[in-house]
């Protein structure tokens, strides 16, 4: 097979739509319009207390979000590893759903639940005859932190459960036989044993919350600004491109460093201890039953309540079902150039193009990585995951406005950007399935006269078909919910669903708010359907997410 020729497409795509925009950001931050060296953007950041405080806030809120997420997920991991109970698989699937939801849907859900006019406050005001909301969480850091825990809960839960389930129970049994109590068992056996998984999950959650954009922008308001939000403001509101570029460059450096740390930790948790794996059992004592019940109830409340509140508020906010009907209208004076429902069509078209491109390029990349000589491509195509969507969108804004790639005014840039974000998910879905195909299977096909194309068509594709479908579903979902990059490059006449929701949420009036909730419910249903496909197919595909 002409591997070198095959590698051209994915490497060229990465070079044009990832490396080139980042180089443009670097050039914008280090040069003046005449091409000379200009570090004024960095000087302004270093000498300004505001930017230092922004960096510090971004760091400590990410650390606090990580700590809270681990604290919430660890008890759930104990229950999932040690106990069997009805609905266990369903609850694990439910825990993973928030991770594939768009940030604007999560933000809208928590606003519908805990906002000043949200479901909880409305119920308390009606029950006790109050004139104002008793729970004031709107535009607070507390609401942002709760949303971060909701979003990243599954990351910690799945990594700890997967690692712990493969550990031998003999170590704990030996500790008990030596007289270790519950406290000593946790501090001297379990926590040291789980430290690699907890550390890797913590670094991953820190990366996600450090680069949090939509949740902070919508729920935090102007008072709270992470680096992501500040890059957006500097580029699109203040138009200080050198500062925006300098902030982007700082964030890229920090995130690549965190990705290296995560890669090292990830290698540690892929080597399980030898021995018989842990076996879950039914809770035997009343304390175990009560503890498991409390954890499951709290977990269910965290995961279900915000989404249920979103649906209820969409159906009961002024207009009710009329909010869905108004999505097809574009009245005079609207902030949108097209009816909100047109954004659904735009997003579906963009998601379809993204899926086709991501699956095609992902298959080629996975095949190349599976060939021993091209394993360096695996790390190369993971780099977009360490680069925030806002930074990529800003890079497109700078790099794609002049020949030979004058695409800034073209809607085609949106699916291209989404493909870059979705491509790593396809590679991670397909590669493990390819690696599980025994060599003697492909050797037998070749012995029967099949050429390289025939081996792929008749042997490999049928075997990895379910993994490809998982990658396609991820690509479709990622494209539907992508917000950060789209906010920079989407044209007013071709908005996506998340952008319409964001714009409607930012406008006063019950009608705008009702339509934003209606759009969020539509996006929730579509992403939920895609997630159901992923969960159904991933069961028989080892190593997939």
Image: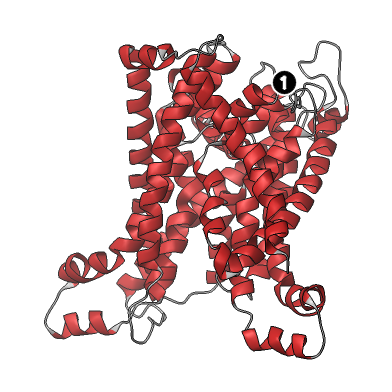
Q: From this view, report whether residue 437 is shown above or below residue 249.
A: below
Q: Is residue 130 left or right of 350 when viewed as pictured?
A: left
Q: Which residue is mark 1?
A: 402
Q: From this view, report whether residue 515 is shown above or below residue 425.
A: above
Judging depth in this view, the residue of 318 and 244 nearest the camera is: 244
The image quadrant of residue 483 is top right
Q: Is residue 425 left or right of 144 when viewed as pictured?
A: right
- Rendered-image quadrant of the N terminus: bottom right
Which residue is at a point 23% across and 66% down the rendered structure image?
192
Which residue is at a point 63% across and 84% down the rendered structure image?
439
**Given the current orientation, which residue lies at the most extreme left position?**
179
Q: Is residue 504 left or right of 380 when viewed as pictured?
A: right
Q: Could you tell me which secondary element the residue under label 1 belongs to?
A: loop
Query: Whole-percent x and y of residue 49?
Result: 31, 13
Judging depth in this view, the residue of 41 and 120 nearest the camera is: 41
Query: Whole-percent x and y of residue 493?
Result: 82, 23
- Rendered-image quadrant of the C terminus: bottom right
The image quadrant of residue 540 is bottom right
């Amino acid at each position: 097979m002409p591997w070198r020729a095959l590698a051209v497409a994915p490497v060229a795509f990465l070079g044009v739509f990832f490396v080139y925009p980042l180089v443009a950001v670097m050039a914008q931050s280090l040069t003046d319009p005449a091409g000379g060296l200009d570090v004024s953007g960095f000087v302004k950041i270093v000498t300004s207390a505001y930017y230092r405080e922004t960096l510090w806030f971004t760091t400590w809120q990410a650390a606090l979000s990580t700590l809270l997420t681990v604290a919430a997920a660890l008890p759930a991991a104990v229950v999932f590893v040690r106990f069997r109970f009805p609905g266990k698989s369903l609850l694990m699937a439910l825990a993973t759903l928030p991770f594939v939801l768009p940030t604007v849907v999560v933000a809208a859900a928590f606003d519908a639940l805990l906002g000043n006019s949200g479901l909880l406050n409305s119920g308390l005001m009606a029950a006790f005859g109050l004139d104002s909301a008793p729970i004031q969480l709107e535009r607070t850091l507390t609401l942002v932190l709760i949303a971060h825990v909701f979003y990243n809960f599954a990351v910690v839960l799945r990594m700890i459960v997967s690692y712990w389930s493969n550990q031998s129970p003999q170590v704990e049994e030996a500790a008990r036989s030596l007289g270790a109590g519950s406290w000593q068992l946790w501090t001297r056996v379990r926590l040291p044993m789980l430290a690699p998984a907890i550390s890797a999950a913590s670094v991953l959650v820190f990366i996600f919350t450090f680069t949090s954009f939509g949740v902070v922008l919508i729920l935090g308001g102007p008072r709270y600004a992470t680096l992501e939000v500040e890059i957006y403001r500097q580029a699109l509101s203040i138009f200080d491109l050198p500062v925006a570029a300098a902030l982007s460059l700082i964030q890229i450096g920090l995130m690549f460093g965190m990705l290296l740390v995560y890669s090292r930790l990830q290698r540690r948790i892929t080597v399980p201890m030898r021995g018989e794996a842990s076996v879950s059992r039914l809770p035997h004592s009343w304390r175990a039953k009560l503890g498991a019940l409390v954890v499951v109830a709290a977990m269910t409340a965290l995961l279900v309540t915000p989404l249920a509140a979103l649906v209820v508020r969409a159906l009961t906010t002024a207009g009710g079902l009329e909010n869905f009907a108004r999505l097809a209208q574009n009245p005079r004076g609207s902030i949108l150039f097209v009816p909100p429902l047109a954004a659904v069509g735009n997003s579906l078209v963009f998601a379809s193009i993204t899926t086709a491109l991501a699956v095609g390029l992902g298959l080629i990349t996975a095949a190349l990585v599976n060939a021993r000589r091209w394993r360096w491509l695996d790390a190369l195509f993971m780099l977009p995951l360490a680069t925030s969507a806002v930074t990529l969108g800003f890079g497109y804004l700078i790099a794609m406005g002049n020949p030979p790639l004058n695409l800034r005014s073209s809607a085609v840039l949106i699916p291209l950007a989404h493909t870059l974000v979705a491509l790593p998910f396809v590679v991670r879905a397909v590669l493990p399935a390819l690696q599980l195909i025994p060599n003697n299977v492909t050797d037998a096909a070749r012995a029967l006269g099949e050429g390289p194309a025939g081996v792929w068509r008749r042997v490999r594709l049928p075997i990895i078909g379910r993994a490809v479908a998982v990658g396609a579903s991820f690509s479709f979902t990622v494209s539907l919910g992508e917000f950060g990059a789209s906010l920079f490059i989407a044209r007013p006449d071709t908005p996506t669903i998340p952008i319409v929701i964001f714009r409607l949420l930012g406008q006063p009036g019950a009608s705008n708010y009702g339509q934003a909730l209606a759009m969020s419910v539509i996006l929730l249903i579509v992403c939920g359907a895609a997630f159901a496909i992923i969960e159904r197919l991933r069961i028989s595909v080892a190593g997939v997410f």
